[in-house]
Image (cartoon, grey):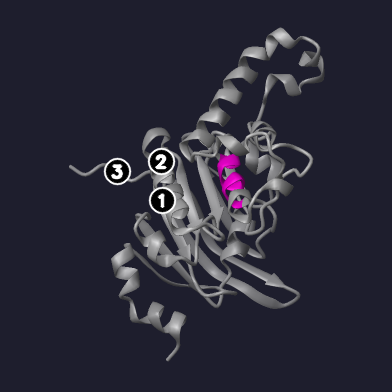
Amino acid sequence: MSKEVRHILATRNVSKYFEGVKVLEKVSITIPEGGIIGLIGPNGSGKTTLFNIITGFHVPSEGEVLYRASNEFIRIDGLNPHEIYRLRIVRTFQLPRLFHSLTVIENLLVTPVGQRGESILNAVRWRTWLEEEKNLVKKALGILAMFNKLEIAFKYPAQLSVADIKLVETLRGLMANARLYLLDEPLAGLDFATARRLLNFIKEIRNSYNVTFIIIEHRIDLLMETVDYVYVLHNGRLLASGKPDEVIQNPDVVKAYVGE
């Protein structure tokens, strides 16, 4: 008997207009818990706009976004980004947004929500948060070690290569104990070996911690090796969906990418 699929996110007929221009039109997707889902499409197809709606940076003009916070779905469209983040929905951006005055390890350490030391009352009571801080440092160093990047731990973003900045942006979100992690072009700027290692690490995180991933990516050859299911947007509409092999062979998808 097959295991029942449990979904963590659903969009229902989500549309978005900017000054009368339709960017998304009635997009409905469902994301299975523990899945790695690809979101692809030509430039301007609405992928990042959909991410922005899911994570609270835009409010949909129509439709709704539902998230399984515990045992039931709640509507999250209209919530602020920080409220959605506290629901353990984490995202990255196409352009990395690191804190330039902080070192790499400090950028990783500020990510987890609800740290005891953040409380004004606890700030001077260091014994209440010292052990937690030590454990977070170990976790951050462990993540860097998995990518053989311990040497950048105490460097500032200005001292890093473009590839390392992109990598740190992605790794930072893994410190937040995300349930749903949206990655916007995580492989951009990474060499082939690092990109594949990152995707393998994503699979390890999914398998070990049941984190659900939605990934926007233009390097489709690598993405299709990793994802379980793919949604394709084109001109703001859902063009196709299915298993990677099905999508790659879909003539409508081929036409959208390469033209007539």
Foreground mark, 3 or 2, reads 2
Badge 2 amino acid: Arg
Q: Is residue 214 left or right of residue 227?
A: right
The prevailing secondary structure element of the residues shown in magenta is helix
Q: Residues within 10 Å of mark 2 (few under 14, many from 20)?
A: some
Residue shown at 58% from the left, 61% from the top: 50
Measured as percent of width and height from the top left, residue 49 is found at: 62, 64
Residue shown at 36% from the left, 38% from the top: 207
Where is 188 relative to 118, above or below? below
Q: Which residue is mark 2?
A: 206
Q: Quadrant of the C terminus?
A: bottom left
Helix, strand or loop under label 2: helix
Residue shown at 51% from the left, 73% from the top: 237
Residue at the farthest left position: 1
Quote the CA–CA distance across marks 1 and 2.
8 Å
Q: Residue 141 is drawn in which quadrant?
A: top right
Measured as percent of width and height from the top left, residue 53 is found at: 63, 57
Residue at the farthest bottom position: 260
Foreground mark, 3 or 1, reads 1
Q: Which residue is mark 1?
A: 36
Q: Quadrant of the N terminus?
A: top left
Q: Residue 192 is drawn in which quadrant?
A: bottom left
The region drawn magenta spans: 166-173
Where is 252 relative to 228, above or below? below
Q: Which mark is residue 4?
A: 3
Q: Residues within 10 Å of mark 1 (few under 14, many from 20)?
A: many
Question: Who comes first in sequence, dot 3 or dot 2?
Answer: 3
Q: Residues within 10 Å of mark 3 (few under 14, many from 20)?
A: few
Question: Who comes first in sequence, dot 3 or dot 1?
Answer: 3
Badge 1 amino acid: Ile
